[in-house]
Amino acid sequence: MNFRPLVFLLALGNASLSQEAPPKIPTYVYAFAYAPGLESIQIKTGDKTYQELRLSTANIVGPVNAVISDGSISLHREPEASSEQENPVHPLIGKAKLKEETKSALVVLLPSPPGSKLPYRSLVLEHARADFPMGVYRLINLSTYPVRGMVGQSIVRTKPGGIADLKLQGEPGAALPVRFEFFKDDRWNLLTETRCAVRKDRRWLMCLYEDPRTKRLNIRSIPDRRVPPAETE
């Protein structure tokens, strides 16, 4: 019996498996603040390919179909060497660690503390519509204080470093009272008091943080009208 064709087919099958494309994930990015000199980043999209993203502190940008390697998305800067090189090196500037069940990633970038190995640290949130529906405020408490809030009759609480969702209740267009407080000096202190309209056509990130210059606690609200492409109806 001639085994050569069988050996050839097995070798071809093994070669095909070894060249199988790496897993990818739709990835969106929001920069809470810029690391020095890094207002644009490169995200790995293939074995030797990268896509540039210009970061924004006012909007969520993306999506990029990012490669998953060892459970993470790698973030890079543009090559330092001449682009004429066959394989220019893209220096690593950050890594975004994914949970195994993440379907669509929203990477929140923050500058790393002085002396850190990489200039960016990251927080990864699930961005799939089923987990983060329209009409929801997703609170990210970057402060060192417990925070509580009320929008209409809906109440939310977050501990320092915590994440919580607040879904607006009511008819679209209805104006609801908003009040947020933070716990300091053994009492609840007013953070903000305003009104907002119920919207079912968007969702928001709401970052609670302490301004390093004024030492005051602030809120930054970022509307997100984007729906991951795979889930567009």
Image (cartoon, helix red, strand yellow):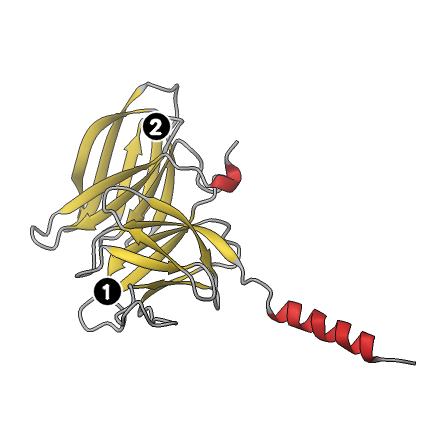
Q: Residues within 10 Å of mark 1 (few under 14, many from 20)?
A: some
The residue at 38%/55% (across/down) is 124
The residue type indicated by label 1 comes to Ser
Q: Earlier in the sequence, mark 2 or mark 1?
A: 1
Check the picture and name the quadrant holding the N terminus: bottom right
Asked whether the viewer can see residue 136, the reply is yes
158 shown above or below 177: below
The label number, if any, that marks residue 112 in the structure image = 1
The residue under label 2 is 153
Residue in the foreground of this view, choosing between 3 and 223 = 3
The residue at 28%/37% (across/down) is 149
Asked whether the viewer can see residue 161, the reply is no
The residue type indicated by label 2 comes to Gln
The quarter of the displayed image where residue 37 is located: bottom left
Is 69 displayed left or right of 109 in the figure?
right
158 shown above or below 50: above
Q: Contact (CB < 8 A) between labels 2 and 1?
A: no
Which secondary structure, mark 1? loop
**CA separation in Å, label 2 and label 1:** 37 Å
Residue in the foreground of this view, choosing between 171 and 224 = 224
